[in-house]
Structures are given as structure tokens and as C-alpha cells.
Amino acid sequence: MKDSSGRQLQLFSDDVLLSARAVHDDFEPRRLGQARRLAGLTKQALGEAVGVSGASIGQYEAAVTVPGPNVIAALARELGMPVAFFTPGRPIGQIDASQAHFRSLRSTRSSEKLKAATYAEWVWELSLALEKRVLLPEPNVPSLDDSSESMTPAEAAMALRDYWELGTGPLRHLTLTMEHNGILVTCPSFDHDGQAPVRVDAFSTSALERPIVVTTLERAKSVYRHRFTCAHELGHLVLHRDVVPGDPRQEREADAFAAELLTPRAEIEPLLPSTMNLARLGRVGLEWGVSTESLIRRMQEVKGIADVSVRRAYQKIREQNRLGTRQDPTTADSSGEQPSLLREAMSVAEQNGFSTVDLANELRWPIQRVRELLGIQETRPRLRLVHG
């Protein structure tokens, strides 16, 4: 296969990749664990699929034994990876799921956390490969862990506004702002099975050299929800970088940080009505890029609106949603809220002769996986054959 300049592109084929027998002599067990977790498979399920026991898979991953060539070939087929993926010689990201802040603490299962953490590892590895060709923005996120006792989440949010020189008024293009400050923001389009991983609402981690924030398509359905989620995870990166995740108090602090970052109290309070007025709140929300629901909570915080008024307002909004009379804009409708750092870096690399196929070969990933993590959508229609 050749590109437009006639340069031969090397694909994952038998004449390019190492044979399973050669891989057997240089097998990287951590890669097997990565691919299995990203596929969402237990050791037992993967073992059954390739004809070995779950205990054998565990021994392979722990480097106690090495799978034979036939098993390596079967693992590659089952996991959708080239056999060369299981070789060493390139950086490997390692994130313990306990090092990540998950948006939904109670509803996120352990297996989903592992899968999400592995996804973040791959995002980091992808960024590292691109950084060999393109200079990405340096990470620029201050850690306020040491001053957390003396600084409230709201004060930390205003400190970050000052540090990033964001000025006053609505914070436009939050996602782009985070990317400009070296944060990898990504919204996976689908997982290994082609389904959106909606059970993991969002998470963030500073376990690697570059901070990572992952949101999901479910959050991206509303740009307001997406922006608050990103601001919430940013709160974790600023407030909780060196603390053990999992404390519900941390989630409340991240919410308070997000509310102040997006709607500073000193600026938003004069704009809020003295009594519950959903139409006016909707107009304010449109200007500031936040939901009516978040402004209702803000009214309760800064104006002491009674609980009964808040409940009635939420009930009315739920009714509007049920009737379809209310629709929030999506991230696709909002410039600066779709993650673009990795995709733009790939575009620059391509201008200098480095293609997505080259990137896939270097990472030893399937080309489709590279496109997924870059956020490159498939635009071709899918052919479906129907038996007559």
C-alpha cells in the first residue's frame, strides 16, 4: 500500500511483524494484561477463548511462564492485536486504578475502573509517540495539595483562574484551555466492543508525566454537563494530586471547585434572580456555559433559596425533559469543547511525513485503535450484506 507520494506504507502483515515464535522469545507480560483489561475480559474468559486456563493467563501476566507460539497467536486474534504488540522496547504506561479519581464512586465497578485506567495508559503512550515529532504544550497545572487546609475549593478555583490568566466573565472553551495547559482531555467514542463506556462517567489521573482527563459520550450529550465534568476533574488535578482517591469529600470539593471556576460567586450572584425564575436562569446559563440545574444549586448556595423551591424547579425541568421541550447543546455544537490536542498533533505530524499508519506501526497497535484514540471518526458508510 502506498501513500499519495508513492512512499510504501508498512501495514501489520506477516512480512512486517515478528512471528509468534520470535515473540515467544521476547514476550512482554505487561502488554498482555493491558490488552486483556482494555478488552474487558477476565483471565478466565480469555483463557477459555484461547484454550488455556484462567490460571495460565495469570501466570503469563505475572511473568511466571511464557505462552507458546500457538497461544500467542490465539491471544493476538482474540484481543484484536498484532503479535508484535506483545514485544518490549517501547514505553508502557502503568496506572493503578486506585490512583485515579472516578466521577461515580459507588456505581463504577472494579473491572470498569481497570479498563478505564488502561485506556488512559494508551492515551499517554499515544501522546508520547506523537511528542517525538510534535512539541505538545507543557503540563501547567499547579498542585494546591499542600495548601488545601488553608485554601477552600472555591479559593483554589479563583487561584487557578489567576494563574492561567483567564480574567473575569464566562470561561470560554474550557476543554481547549485545559489542553493549552498540557492536560490530555479525551472522550472515547466507543470501547473494544463498540459500545460507549457510559458506566464510567469520567475520571482523571496525575499518575503519569502528563495529567489526563477522560469523559464519555454520555457526558458529551450536553455541553453543560461536559464542561462541569471537565471542571470537576480539573479540581481533582489541582486539589487532590497527592492524596488517595475514593473519599466522597473529595468529590464534594471537586464540585465546589467546578462551580466557582465556571461561575465565580462574586460575578454570578448579581445575575441570579431573587426568586426562582427558570427562564432567566436559562439565559444566564447560556451566557456562562452552564446548565440551569447548576444555577439552581448556585442560587441555593449564594441566596439561600428554600429547599421546596429547589425541588419544584428540578421537577419542572424533569417534566420539560420528558416532554422534549428542552434540549441542551452538545459538545459537537460548541467550538472549543471537543478534545483536539492529539488530533491536531497528528495533523502536524502528517504534514511532516509521519502518517497514522506509521504511528500504528511504532506503537504496534491496530490502525483502527490509533484512529479511535486520536478521535478520528470513520466517515465511510458501512456495507451490510443481507441474505435474500
Image (cartoon, rainbow, N blue to C red):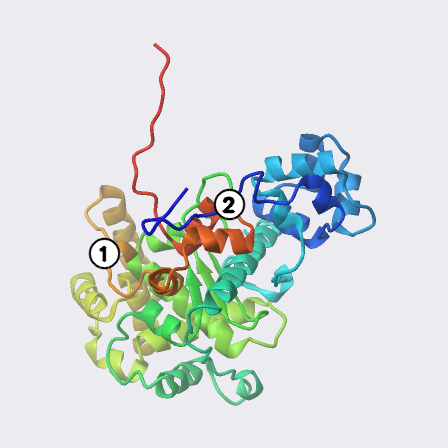
Spatial CA span between label 1 and label 2: 30 Å
Q: Earlier in the sequence, mark 1 or mark 2?
A: 1
Q: Name the residue under label 1.
A: 333
Q: Is residue 50 above or below residue 152?
A: above
Q: Mark 2 points at which residue?
A: 366
Which label belongs to residue 177? none
Residue 329 in view: no
Residue 242: where, in percent of width, then height? 60, 77
Left or right relative to 338: residue 282: left
Residue drawn 56% across and 59% down?
121
Label 2 secondary element:
loop
Q: Percent position (x, y) of residue 84?
A: 62, 47
What kind of residue is marked 1?
Asp
Q: What residue type is labelled 2?
A: Pro
In this view, 141 is above or below 134: below
Along the line of sight, the residue nearer the viewer: 250 or 53 = 53
Q: Position of residue 371 (x, y in %)?
A: 42, 50
